[in-house]
Image (cartoon, helix red, strand yellow):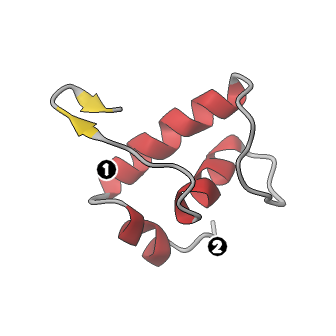
Amino acid sequence: MNKPSIDILITKVDSKYSLVVAAAKRARSIVEGAPVLVETDSKKPVTQALYEIAADKIKYERTKSGIK
């Protein structure tokens, strides 16, 4: 994965763990039929989710039970 850069992505979240969980949840929703919020060349849901996080289209909220 060259783009989006991990340097950019890590500024959007509070930890690498949060990045992984947020990207995985968003990728699952894309697979289930949710529309992709940014234009990418990739057809892979995880890459599309990472582009969305880098573009500030996806926000997350930490709760006691996990990420929402």
Mark 1, secondary structure of its residue: helix
Residue 17's disc is 1
Quadrant location, the N terminus: bottom right
Q: What residue is pinned by disc 2?
A: 2
Residue drawn where x is 68% and y is 33% of the image: 30
Q: Horizontal and vertical percent for residue 20? A: 42, 47
Front in this rendered view, residue 38 or 5? 38
Determine whether label 1 and label 2 are within 8 Å by CB: no
Please state which amino acid type lies under the numbered disc 2: Asn
Count neighbours of disc 2 (C-alpha within 10 A) and say few if under 14, some if 14 to 19, many if 20 or more.
few
Quarter of the rendering containing residue 34? top right
Mark 2, secondary structure of its residue: loop
Q: Is residue 14 above or below residue 11?
A: above
Q: Is residue 14 above or below residue 30?
A: below
Q: Residue furthest top?
A: 32
Q: Which of marks 2 and 1 precedes in the sequence? A: 2
Front in this rendered view, residue 14 or 37? 37
Count neighbours of disc 1 (C-alpha within 10 A) and say few if under 14, some if 14 to 19, many if 20 or more.
few
Please state which amino acid type lies under the numbered disc 1: Tyr
Quarter of the rendering containing residue 39? bottom right
Residue drawn where x is 28% and y is 58% of the image: 15
The tally of labels here is: 2
